[in-house]
Amino acid sequence: MALDKTGIAKRIAKEVKDGYYVNLGIGIPTLVANYVREDIEVEFQSENGVLGMGPFPFEGEEDADIINAGKQTITTLPGASFFDSAMSFSMIRGQHVDLTILGAMEVSENGDIANWKIPGKMVKGMGGAMDLVASAENIIVAMMHTNKAGESKLLKRCSLPLTGVGCVKKIVTNLAVLEVTDNGFKLLERAPGISVEDIKNTTEGTLIVEGDIPEMSL
Amino acid sequence: MINKKVANVHEALQGVSDNMTFMFGGFGLCGIPENSINELVKLNLKGLTCISNNAGVDDFGLGLLLHKKQIKKMVSSYVGENDEFERQMLSGELDVELIPQGTLAERCRAAQSGFPAIYTPAGYGTEVAEGKETREFDGKMYVLEHAFKADFSFVKAWKGDAAGNLIFKGTARNFNPAMCGAAKITVAEVEELVPVGTLDPNQIHIPGIFVQRIFQGEIYEKRIEQRTVRQKS
């Protein structure tokens, strides 16, 4: 069984370690916050200017002045802080944020990522994505293995305009966990019930399979 | 104390004219200078270049200026939360320059701080870096990005005083501090203009030296773009 979006988020949550400052992108990455172990201390950063983001407010307690990067109303947790956009990106470019999780339309086997623009369609902009991918040491991409047309999103070369070059380290899809290496996508784990063959068939870029590939535990 | 207080938004916007470049604080609709924007709509200036992270929604924020076709060019990191914007962009009426969010903030800060340009890794190897100078430092590539030049910057704070000192609230801070002093004239509007001496100097986010004019906004709608809540269990 391929994972659903929640499954991908659950698997990525296992990458979040005690003491991490984490920036979550919009979409599947946002779900990761729901599945982080409760016995570790993690702070979520939102690039519009908050560290120590909490859950959505209860109805009637929304504050127009407290939102996340998706413009959603949020709350803060004890120990939280607010800051301006320049300082926020100092945290990001300065590599003070330990882990960045974001979605992608395409990833190439050398770690390039494309996630902001489809030529011919309305372009909304890159927001903070280019700053995040250019700077973060530890970037995990959360995405489906194939697009809606069934085509691989793990490519030899990205076909869409790039967001960043050679920056992605790890990818968690509905089918697999993969690491970007000098020689291509190294298969680390399979989704439950998914075969290595299934993954080979849906990966256009170079896939490296060494020994037995374990199933993910969620 | 050097007095920066002006009577109202009308006085605060003295000197604005067609074809100027303006900076606007705010992220989405959070922390935008609502009163200054509404006044610019009334003044019906044309040919404006607007530096702002976003472009508002159809009937609020910079969307109001777009609706009246007052904007010639937008410099933003994320746009298109409004239909009129999309229409004008696709028809070629509106020029749009998209730049990474951190670069946008830092180009404001550079203007504020007296740096002509800064090197950033953001956008290297992408179309954002096309035609720009690049340079390697310690094995990593960076793109040279220039400080903005603007005629006015319009910012919004929570509290301020006649000395121009500002305190922001929550994530409404966003781009506002970096835009203070980043244009020839900085106009700050505040929800609450308090008597000089009542703000604790230890708590000031932006010292008055970066602000030329300050006024208390008449009305703040403070619209929420995405109202998300959880249920009490």
Image (cartoon, rainbow, N blue to C red):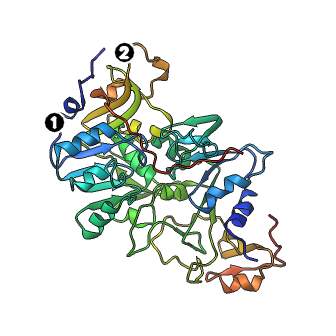
Amino acid under disc 2: Pro
Amino acid under disc 1: Gly
- Asked which secondary structure carries label 1, the reply is loop
Mark linked to residue B195? 2
> Which residue is rendered at x = 52% and y = 58% of the image?
A134
Q: How far separated are the C-alphas under marks 1 and 2?
A: 27 Å
> Which residue is rendered at x = 34% and y = 55% of the image?
B58
Circle 2 chain: B
Q: Answer yes or no: is residue B139 visible.
A: no
Q: Is residue B219 left or right of residue B230?
A: left
Q: Quadrant of the C terminus of chain A?
A: bottom right
Residue A165 locus on image (x, y percent): 52, 66
Residue B133 locus on image (x, y percent): 36, 59
Q: In this view, does B159 lie to the left or right of B188?
A: right
Q: In this view, does B169 lie to the left or right of A54?
A: left
Residue B219 locus on image (x, y percent): 33, 33
Q: Mark 1 points at which residue?
A: B15
- Asked which secondary structure carries label 2, the reply is loop
Rendered view: B194 above or below B158: above
Rendered view: B210 above or below B57: above
Residue A173 locus on image (x, y percent): 67, 71
Quadrant assignment, res A144: bottom right
Circle 1 chain: B
> Which residue is rendered at x = 31% and y = 49% of the image?
B62
Camera-nearest label, 1 or 2 = 2
Rendered view: B214 above or below A183: above
Q: Answer yes or no: is residue A204 visible.
A: yes
Q: Which of marks 1 and 2 is nearer the N terminus?
A: 1
User: Dot 2, crowdedness within 10 Å: few (<14), some or many (≥20)?
Assistant: few
User: Dot 1, crowdedness within 10 Å: few (<14), some or many (≥20)?
Assistant: few
